[in-house]
Image (cartoon, rainbow, N blue to C red):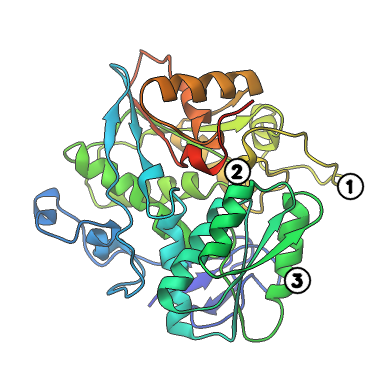
């Protein structure tokens, strides 16, 4: 039976609890969970063509809220760089991988209220999967969120709360609401079930590459949910004897908002405690413009343990990468092109980049 576990102080809670964070330190939960059995590539043939084909390694099973998410194509871009097309998900972003887990968990707990916060894509995904599960939800977004994303959230029937200020102000507003009794906080940052959804990104890659992984996996990092999911998957695959070594995790941030990259290259284990939070600089990569990610220490540790690194990209590089991918046939939102901007010219090792959000969500960068 999986339980919530605080990585900072060891506090535990039952997963049937609506306690959305550690009551002692207010930090995010991990999930104390071990897969039932190892996977075999040969055993996967004929299974459901969604992320639920990896049921042995997931903390939930037999879902009723699935929209067929997962199993996105892996397409070569160059001789060494391939792209995983997660913008082909039901809500047009990789966030569906984790949102289906949160909605399925919420359906089983039957809370009185569901809240989420997002810069757009996670909120859209939670709204869609709550609609699928027949659950009402409220999504908090910053005032700078793309109109196309807010339109999509409303279309799925969610109540939209637009918060003045930046992404951090939005998170604080949602967490205040999450403290109300009977509320399930569908947080892609604090609830570890989300990470166990995003880890299927790597399981799919492993399957499609015939039971192996590339030398490196590049991911855009704001709150780090895809990177931490990748770290979970590679650790599980190694523990099951299904890979010989873990690939390097290459974390990519926008130069304009790069607190983790700065901390990494200064050798820090976490982010400094500033006297006040300055508003982050504007960036086209709105989905990773996170000045204070709650899982900062875990993200930094995961990159170091993998032998990876942090890279940053400029706004001009983001613009150029979006146009370059479009010229190759892939129309991707500005956050989703960051990894291509960072590693697209690599030739010395194999690497996979995620194209994790559709261009229709933000339009072409000016």
Secondary structure under tag 1 reads loop
Instruction: Write down the residue under mark 3.
Output: 176
Q: Is residue 317 above or below residue 267?
A: above
Q: Nearer the viewer, mark 2 or mark 1?
A: 2
Residue 338 in sight from this viewpoint: yes
For marks 3 and 1, give the CA distance. Answer: 19 Å
Dot 2 crowding, Cα within 10 Å, few <14, some 14–19, many 20+ = many
State the image quarter where residue 55 is shown: bottom left
First-in-chain label (2 vs 3):
3
Do tag 2 and tag 1 residues touch (Cβ < 8 Å)?
no
For marks 2 and 3, give the CA distance. Answer: 22 Å
Residue at x 76%, y 65% (from the top left corner): 173
**Camera-nearest residue between 355 and 349:** 355
Residue at x 89%, y 47% (from the top left corner): 276
Residue at x 58%, y 48% (from the top left corner): 148
Residue 204 x, y percent position in the rendering: 27, 46
Q: Is residue 82 above or below residue 186?
A: above
Dot 1 crowding, Cα within 10 Å, few <14, some 14–19, many 20+ = few
Residue 338 x, y percent position in the rendering: 53, 29
Instruction: Write down the residue under mark 2.
Output: 287
Do tag 2 and tag 3 residues touch (Cβ < 8 Å)?
no
């Amino acid at each position: 039976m999986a339980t919530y576990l605080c990585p900072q102080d060891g506090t535990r809670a039952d997963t049937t609890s609506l306690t959305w964070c550690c009551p002692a330190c207010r930090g995010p939960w991990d999930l104390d969970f071990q897969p039932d059995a190892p996977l075999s590539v040969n055993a996967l043939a004929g299974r459901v063509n969604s992320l639920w084909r990896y049921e042995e390694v997931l903390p939930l099973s037999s879902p009723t809220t699935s929209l067929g998410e997962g199993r996105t194509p892996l397409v070569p871009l160059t001789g060494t760089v391939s792209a995983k097309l997660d913008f082909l998900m039901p809500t047009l972003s990789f966030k569906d991988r984790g949102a289906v887990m949160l909605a399925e968990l919420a359906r089983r707990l039957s809370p009185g209220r569901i809240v989420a916060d997002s810069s757009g894509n996670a909120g859209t995904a939670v709204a869609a999967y709550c609609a699928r599960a027949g659950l009402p939800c409220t999504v908090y977004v910053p005032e700078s969120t793309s109109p196309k994303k807010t339109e999509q959230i409303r279309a799925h029937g969610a109540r939209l709360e637009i918060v003045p200020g930046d992404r951090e102000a939005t998170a604080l507003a949602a967490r205040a609401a999450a403290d109300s009794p009977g509320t399930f906080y569908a947080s892609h940052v604090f609830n570890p079930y989300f990470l166990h959804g995003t880890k299927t990104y790597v399981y799919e890659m492993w399957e499609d590459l015939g039971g192996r992984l590339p030398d490196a996996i590049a991911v855009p990092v704001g709150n780090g949910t895809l990177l931490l999911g990748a770290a979970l998957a590679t650790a599980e695959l190694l523990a099951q004897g299904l890979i010989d070594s873990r690939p390097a995790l290459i974390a990519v941030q926008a130069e304009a908002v790069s607190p983790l990259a700065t901390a990494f290259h200064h050798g820090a284990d976490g982010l400094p405690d500033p006297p006040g939070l300055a508003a982050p600089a504007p960036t086209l990569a709105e989905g990773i413009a996170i000045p204070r990610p709650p899982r900062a220490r875990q993200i930094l540790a995961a990159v170091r343990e993998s032998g990876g690194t942090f890279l940053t990209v400029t706004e001009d590089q983001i613009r150029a990468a979006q146009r370059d991918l479009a010229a190759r046939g892939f129309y991707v939102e500005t956050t989703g092109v960051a990894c291509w901007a960072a590693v697209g010219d690599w030739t010395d090792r194999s690497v996979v980049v995620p194209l994790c959000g559709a261009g229709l969500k933000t339009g072409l960068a000016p």
